[in-house]
Amino acid sequence: MLVKFSRHAKRRAKLYNISEPTIENILVNMDLTQGEHKVIKNVSGFRYPIKIVVAVEGDIITVITSYPLKKGRGQ
């Protein structure tokens, strides 16, 4: 699987200090089907869970955005 980052996703990751390898490790270990997905994972080193929105087309996973969920909202 190839993981690509949208411009927006790169900017959000930099804003919230989420490294691209961290996001890639989360996504590669998941079995995602075609379409859009919202992934919420607890990651060590972050106070809040990380929410990652992706679109899967064929063998390509495109990260649309990623950000920490404040106070557990959205779960």
Image: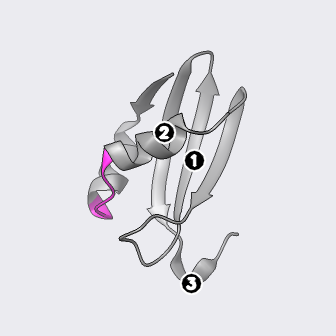
Boundaries of the magenta span: 15-20
Q: Is residue 52 left or right of residue 32?
A: left
Which one is earlier in the sequence, the residue at label 2 or at label 3? 2
Pointer 1 local density, CA inside 10 Å: few below 14, some 14–19, many at least 20: some
Which picture quadrant has residue 30? top right
Q: Look at the numbered discs 2 and 3 and tell me whether their residues touch, using CB distance below 8 Å.
A: no
Residue for point 57% across, 17% down = 59
Which one is earlier in the sequence, the residue at label 1 or at label 3? 1
Mark number, residue 43: none
Colour setting: one colour
Pointer 3 local density, CA inside 10 Å: few below 14, some 14–19, many at least 20: few
Residue for point 35% across, 71% down = 45
Q: Secondary structure at mark 2?
A: strand
Residue for point 62% across, 52% down = 39
Residue for point 68% across, 37% down = 36
Name the residue carrying label 1: 53
* Whole-number angstrom distance, CA of label 1 to CA of label 2: 6 Å
Q: Up-down: is 57 above or below 69? A: above
- Residue 23: percent from the left, percent from the top? 43, 46
Which one is earlier in the sequence, the residue at label 1 or at label 2? 1
Query: Quick check: is 1 in the magenta stretch?
Result: no
Q: Secondary structure at mark 1?
A: strand
Nearer to me, 44 or 40? 44
Q: Look at the numbered discs 1 and 2 and tell me whether their residues touch, using CB distance below 8 Å.
A: yes
Q: Amino acid at mark 1?
A: Val
Query: Quick check: is 19 in the magenta stretch?
Result: yes
* Whole-number angstrom distance, CA of label 2 to CA of label 3: 23 Å
Q: Up-down: is 54 above or below 11? A: above
Q: Amino acid at mark 3?
A: Lys
Name the residue carrying label 2: 63
Name the residue carrying label 3: 71
- Residue 17: percent from the left, percent from the top? 28, 62
